[in-house]
Amino acid sequence: MNVRKEIRITGIVQGVGFRPYVFRLAADRRLAGNVCNTSSGITIEIQGPRESVEDFLRLLPQNPPVLAQISGMTVSEIPCASDAPFEILPSHAEDHADTVISPDVAVCPDCLRELFDPRDRRFCYPFINCTNCGPRFSIVRGIPYDRALTSMSVFPLCADCRAEFDDPFNRRFHAQPNACWKCGPRLELWNSDGQPIECAGPIAAVVENLRRGQIAAIKGLGGFHLAVDATNESAVERLRQRKRRIEKPFAVMVADLAAARSLCEIEPEDAALLESRERPIVLLPRRPESSIARSVAPGHAELGIFLPYTPVHHLLFRDANFPALVMTSANLSEEPIAIRNCEAVARLGRIADCFLVHDREILLRCDDSVVRRSAGKLRRLRRSRGYVPAPLSLHKNLPQILAVGGELKNTVSFTRGNLAFLSQHIGDLENAETFDFFREAIAHLQQIFEISPAIIAHDLHPDYLSTKWALAQKSLPLAAVQHHHAHIASCMAENSLEGRVIGVALDGSGYGPDGCVWGGEVLVAGYESYLRAGHFSYVSLAGGEAAVREPWRVAVSYLRQAFGPDFVNLDIPFVRGLNGRKLDLLFRMIDRRINSPLTSSCGRLFDAVSALVGLRREVSYEAQAAIELEMAARESCDSASYPFSILRKEGPWQIDWTPLMHAIVQDIRSNVSIGTISRRFHSGLADAVKGLAFILREEWSLNRVCLTGGSFQNVVLSQSVEAKLRQEGFEVFTHSIVPAGDGGLSLGQALVAAHSNLV
């Protein structure tokens, strides 16, 4: 007896070869029916003998295409229809969208074999792709995911590509970016003025320019890279000067895993990350004997390494014997990555000597992702290309909410049902260009996922551009969310937690309702509310933002508060190197409370210690002092810990750092190494967190601890805190899917808003 079933599947099921997979599964069982893309995902009607249909349903979710992710599947019986052969129907839209777009992914092994096969018609074609690889998110305008709604719509398929595109048994069946030399995008080489350069081959010409030490702007999947030979010291220094990036490390691309092993120490898990289809930048321990120029990552024991992920990258390394290429975001410091050809020339003409461009439009910029491994887990430090817009599954359904994140490392999030969609890395909202990108990202995600938010969640800080944008949206209710509460809610959401936890949120700064700058916070929190149970003792931030750029100011504040005015008589190099006139000005600012807010920031404590031991009196990029202090700690195996006091006078518990300052000064006077001082500082800080967590467990009968905030991207600190808490029997939850820093903030804002009285 024949039956007919309707199957609706949601998830990443469009543009990944799911329909031909269904077609083949049905054809093998001689079943009738059809399959089509819809705005909700995939709809299948399958008809035939009940036993064959049941076998089809059993096998359907077992071996889907490599890029597919099934998030939901419903089956219902419907009346039988005429017994026609199984077919693939044209896509159609529905009233609402539940489908998910695949991230951009690296070129697959099958396409690579064709790329380098002289007998293949796509030999050396720089835009080769199939249903298992290539651009997705960065070229899509809307859903269903069909060629007409991508930037490939302007490239009509030639007869050969059309035959592949229409053949359900072909690897390129309905591969929307499908193209070849006859019908697809083309490369061109331009000079710094944007004028085409006559050459036999654009890639060979770029390789020659790179060999001569030039800087090339290379258009990729989600934007342009600026490239130079990573072994050419003068070329790297020239890139730093032109890009205005004084010391922040550059990422380097290498040809393959063997080349990566020559530069870094790589464990099997690291190798799997490097070769994964997401192709993130992976932070790895640097081999001291590597040939990489010193100025690629000055003062760093790690390199950010990644492998080629586009055909153009593979062709570059085929034509050249570079040990590595610097491949850094094509922008001036703090601006968004360039994506359009003319935009790139206008913004980068004074940086790049030449431009390798193509005529496939990038519809939305998407920077490279950055990851590392720590405590046996993958940690996403920057979640962008390769991971976005794959959603995070939530433990329950939420209303449709837009959360706009914070000021630094901004991302935005949308929720829909039990899914949260985090945007790609947007960056620091400190200029008009990045703010424009912020608005573009909101509009694009809202369009492709057809989400109409009922609430907008934002940070409490009134001066953040994200907050100002939210406040200007007059048609929707707003949920203001405290910064560190959002961090903890983000960690809870990622780990599917309900109820309350002890949340430890350590970072540089967040707006405190008491008017102070928070940043070393221990909250008893759930999604609905939080209580500030403890924090680092306050210190004056003399000069406000100037103190963030000049850690010596912060160190002065800590010393003065710990030792009193007589700290100027301490016989240590830091104090001896202070400028008397600047010091007097600083004292007046602190005493008169002029631009000297109080802060509990963990980040500023790291800055102070870094300055005291002689690592960093000034910084050129965010968290530089803390990063270098962490690097120093890795050089020591010392097991001692500096003391902190845990006090309660009135209000929350306080982690008092006064004993720490006395111990550090004593060790400096005793000529203890910087590495040992740093290791003792990290260990002491971990002991302090453990001590306060122990007190709060007794007070609140809570045993779950969430560790979050940018300071927990420090491997030495995070591993130490986690280990010490687990030794005391705590359940410890950390980040892996979303960043612990402000890149994960918007997720927490959305969860808090969903549990507010606005819902």
Image: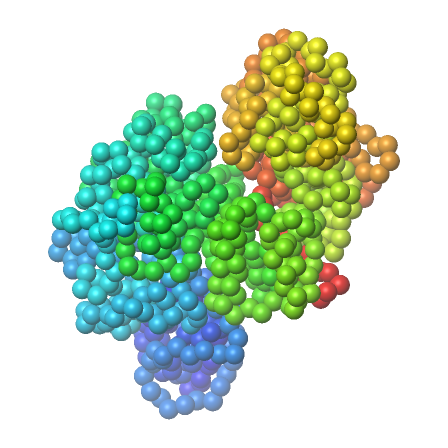
Quadrant of the rendered structure where residue 393 is? bottom right
Q: In the image, residue 229 lies at what x, y percent?
A: 29, 34
Quadrant into which the N terminus falls: bottom left
At x 42% / y 67%, what residue is drawn?
Answer: 141
**Nearer to the camera, 371 or 606:** 606
Quadrant of the rendered structure where residue 718 is? top right
Is 183 above or below relative to 3? Answer: above
Residue 184 appears left or right of 30 = left
**Nearer to the camera, 146 or 613:** 613
Quadrant into which the C terminus falls: bottom right
Q: How is the image coloured?
A: rainbow
At x 37% / y 25%, what residue is drawn?
Answer: 294
Residue 261 appears in view: no
Q: In the image, residue 394 lies at what x, y percent?
A: 60, 59
Q: In the image, residue 558 lies at what x, y percent?
A: 70, 24
**Nearer to the camera, 73 or 108:** 108
Quadrant of the rendered structure where residue 639 is? top right
Is 207 above or below relative to 753? Answer: above
